[in-house]
Amino acid sequence: MLLVEDVTKNFGKFNALKNINLEFHNGVYGLLAPNGAGKTTLIKMLTTLLFPTSGTIRYEGNDIIKMDEMYRDLIGYLPQEFGYYKNYTPTAYLLYLAALKGIDRKTAVSRVKELLKTVALDHVATKKMKKFSGGMIQRVGIAQAMLNDPKILILDEPTAGLDPKERVRFRNLLTNLARDRIVILSTHIVSDVESIANEIITIKNQEVLYKDTVSNICRKIEGLVYETEVHYEDTDRFRSTYLTLSEKQEAGSMHMRFLTTDTAKPEWHSVHPNLEDVFLYIYQDETTAQGSFND
Ligand SMILES: Nc1ncnc2c1ncn2[C@@H]1O[C@H](COP(=O)(O)OP(=O)(O)OP(=O)(O)O)[C@@H](O)[C@H]1O
Ligand SMILES: [Mg+2]
């Protein structure tokens, strides 16, 4: 078990995170928050690349900073900006990293082979990475994070730059890897984590707002989400009255999905909220949340 106890992080006078309390067991955790919310800061503290200003992070009861190398041997990490060598083949690159990690050559050779199979890159094991797609590079990134068969796998925005097909493959891969380890990934894209995360963690105003299952989080706005048809000429007024979650143009009218605490009108259909609705609701007053949402 990985335990974050009352962790605060300041950069000089700037407070990035405050009083963070979290508990992680085996499974997938989605750290879901808009740009600048503090995801990377939290992740860097979980990897000991940054130290908390106050508070403690413990693995199986031990302070991870005191565990030092023993802790780093247990974790695998894919940074948000992941550097690789274009002219290397994935095999050569992973063997090089394995050597840096002190894994003996014989073990490394078989491990690299097995990992490239796991991330479905065995067919390009000896091709230079310069011709790889974004998704292929991300999978090399996951393979490097998995070299030491980590108990804790931490991935910072691992789906950036992936196409929809690669995203599906990636989600399946993570689900498999999370059977016997803690997997923590950060993203600002709801669909990346909605279907696979055992729990979602949202950060707002430097604090953890929710840490719960998708269905429990969605329940927070149960009964407040509706869909209805709105005449074109009324759409602007509608948008300024209710929180629009999505809209679709239809013949002669707009199909609106929206949130309100007002008493329901007869023409409104109540619908079950999804995680994207919740995300739009909790970050409605943050322009970056909406701006970064549509990619
Ligand atoms: N070394 C630093 N010094 C000062 N401020 C920092 C530092 N690192 C991060 N910050 C600030 O802390 C806040 C959180 O940044 P962080 O990188 O953790 O956000 P994030 O959620 O990972 O964002 P993104 O989605 O853009 O990756 C931001 O306001 C950022 O400018
Ligand atoms: Mg980040």
Image: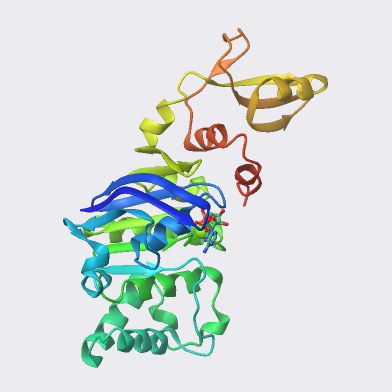
Residue 70 in picture, x, y percent from top left: 21, 72
Residue 154 in picture, x, y percent from top left: 36, 62
Residue 58: image quadrant is: bottom left
**Height in image: 82 above or below 95?**
above
Residue 52: image quadrant is: bottom left
Q: Nearer the viewer, residue 152 or 41?
A: 41
Residue 249 in picture, x, y percent from top left: 73, 32
**With 180 as the anchor, is 4 left or right in this view?**
right
**Height in image: 275 above or below 74?**
above
**With 72 as the anchor, is 83 left or right in this view?**
right
**Height in image: 51 above or below 247?**
below
**With 60 as the anchor, is 57 left or right in this view?**
right
Q: Which of the colour schemes (rainbow, by chain, secondary structure, one colour) is used?
A: rainbow
**Residue placed furthest toward the left:** 61
Q: Nearer the viewer, residue 227 or 99?
A: 99
Q: Is residue 173 visible?
A: no
Q: Is residue 89 visible?
A: yes
Count up the numbered dots: 0
Which residue is located at x 35 percent, y 65 percent? 47
Which residue is located at x 37 percent, y 84 percent? 94
Residue 90: image quadrant is: bottom left
**Residue placed furthest toward the front:** 13
Q: Nearer the viewer, residue 241 or 133?
A: 241
Which residue is located at x 48 percent, y 28 percent? 273
Which residue is located at x 37 percent, y 76 percent? 144
